Amino acid sequence: MRRIYARVASATLAFAFMMGLVVTGTSTASAVVGGQDATTPWTVSLQSVRPDGTGRHECGGALIAPRWVITAKHCEPYIHGFARVGSLQWASGGDLVPVASVIVYPVAGPHMSFGNDMALVKLSRPVKPQYWRYILPLGVQGGVGTVSTMAGWGLTCDTDLNDPACASSFPANLQQLSLQLVPSNDCAPGVCTPPHGGCTLISPDTGMDLNDPATMNCYTPVKAGTGPCFDDSGSPFLRWVGSQPFVVGLDNAEMSTTVLVPHVCSVAPGGGPYHEADTIVAKFVTWIVHTILVNGDADGSQYVQQHAAA
């Protein structure tokens, strides 16, 4: 979902402010506040590499073919390490595969929007066949009121990010919650007060609106006081059709709160409902299929195309 692109620590926050990653009215997403333990590992843990060679969770993603994961474009600087597939724990289990490359969606001209927040992660090898059951078809989000499930390893505490214990509350186990699609104007420019609680994404440098309704949708958690948080970026939004989950969105940005206020990931300032944005996966199916093909994986490209919802 939204947030600053890396873990919440004083040095990281200082760097984020210097690099202009913190924007008025929002932040880049990460962890799940108020969620519950997930039961199926649909989310891929995308990881950087520590100095000792081990991985550290940075962003979520979705496996869409044996060798390919989709995630948020803004995660790209942090995920050139490993992908852990098929585990409810980001640090153990499943299949840990080195990342071969990250291919971001091309945007002509200056990238001054959180729109088009899409990237493909090519793995160094296909995941082991026993984990292919976690491959997700690409789907369509549905209309206003549609409920999706997202899961991630982001922060579980957002009451006081100046408290080291709160700011390091990244869970070992995958956390999930339900979010409901709301009208796009709930995430349009406005004040963070009831009944909508919507705030636009504003660049602190240019004052430019960074929201892009053409490639981003607006959600509010079904349960009040919950929400995605830091390190949840790129985690899939799943819409269920019968027993089949489809990945319909990727956690992108928090739309309701200013940075680092209490309950930054769960309550809008003034007590309004919290809002989160996701990247609309259906907007990128053609690019995904073509990019996988030109990167030497005709079978993977065909698989994605054949399993995408019409």
Image (spheres, rainbow, N blue to C red):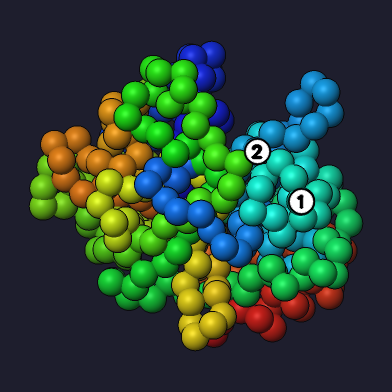
Query: What kind of element bears circle 2?
Result: strand
Amino acid tagged 2: His
| Mark 1 residue element | loop
Give residue 54's mark. Answer: none
Q: Position of residue 247 (x, y in %)?
A: 55, 68
Above or below, comparing residue 160 to residue 126 in the picture: above
What's the CA distance linking mark 2 and mark 1? 14 Å
Q: Are marks 2 and 1 in contact (CB under 8 Å)?
A: no
Instruction: Specify the amino acid type for callout 1.
Output: Gly
Pointer 1: residues within 10 angstroms few (<14), some, or many (20+)?
Answer: few
Q: Quadrant of residue 147?
A: bottom left
Q: Is residue 203 visible?
A: no
Q: Is residue 167 above or below residue 226?
A: above
Residue at x-position 77% and y-position 70%: 132
Looking at the picture, how far across and down is residue 47, in whole percent? Answer: 70, 39
Tell me the quadrant of the picture where the C terminus can be found. Answer: bottom right
In depth, the one of 31 and 290 nearer the eye is: 31
Q: Exactly how many numbered labels are in the figure?
A: 2
Q: Which mark is residue 93?
A: 1
Q: Is residue 94 above or below residue 55?
A: below
Circle 2 is placed at which residue position? Answer: 57
* Residue 253 % position (x, y): 41, 44
Residue 105: give x, y in percent of width and height. Answer: 62, 52
In the image, 184: left or right of 28? left
Counting other residues with Cα less than 10 Å from the Cα at mark 2, is it few (<14), some (14-19), or many (20 or more)? Answer: many
Q: Earlier in the sequence, mark 2 or mark 1?
A: 2
